[in-house]
Amino acid sequence: MSDMKLEKRNAYICKKCRHVTLVVHIDEGVTPMMIRCENCGEIAISFMYRIPPPLMVSFDGSLLPTKEWFNDGGDQLKLRDRTDAKPVMVEYGNDTD
């Protein structure tokens, strides 16, 4: 059995520079439709959990997100840099869990 945790994943694409920010949810909660692009600071729009496979899979079949949604005990999730850079197992067709 793998020690990688299956986490809910999403991506945001910047309207200006087309940079894609990959995110995972480590806690339950509602996330925004738009965030600031980590590349240029402009508006990035959610893929609504329907990430095209070429954007989310590295050569070894893992998703390497740069951000994560977490709950610090308040009523809303917060976005932070994902510093551990651990791979997240990819499971196709599981975008509505």
Image (cartoon, helix red, strand yellow):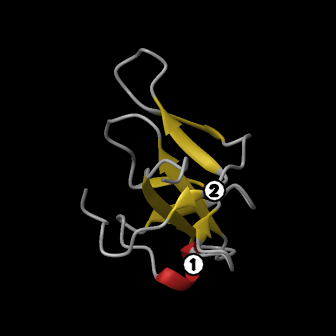
Element at label 2: loop
**Quarter of the view holding residue 49:** bottom left
Label 2 Cα neighbours within 10 Å, binned few <14 / some 14-19 / many ≥20: some
Q: Which mark is residue 87?
A: 2
- The answer to which of 32 and 15 lies nearer the viewer is 32
Instruction: State the image coordinates of residue 60 (x, y, percent, origin top left).
Output: 66, 75
In the depicted structure, whether residue 57 falls above or below residue 1: below
Amino acid carrying mark 1 in the image:
Leu
Label 1, secondary structure: give it: helix
Q: Nearer the viewer, mark 2 or mark 1?
A: 2
Q: Residue furthest left?
A: 96
Query: Image point 69% across, 74% down: which residue?
Result: 17
Residue drawn at x 72%, y 49% as measured from the top left: 85
> Residue 84 at what x, y percent from top left?
72, 41
Type of residue at label 2? Pro
Front residue (pair 65, 80): 65
The residue sitting at the top extreme is 73
Question: Foreground residue, 8 or 33?
Answer: 8
Structural crowding at the residue carrying mark 1, measured as other residues with C-alpha within 10 Å and reported as few (<14), some (14–19) or many (≥20): few
Question: Residue shown at 49%/82% (left/top)?
Answer: 53
**How many callouts does the rendering have?**
2
Front position in the image: 9 or 5: 5
Point out residue 5 in the picture as x, y percentages from the top left corner: 48, 47
> In the image, residue 33 lies at what x, y percent?
39, 55
Answer above or below: position of 79 versus 63.
above
Q: Would you say the residues marked 2 and 1 are in contact, meaning their CB atoms lie under 8 Å apart? A: no
Which quadrant holds the C terminus? Answer: bottom left
Identify the residue position indicated by label 1 in the image.
55
Report whether 41 appears left or right of 93.
right
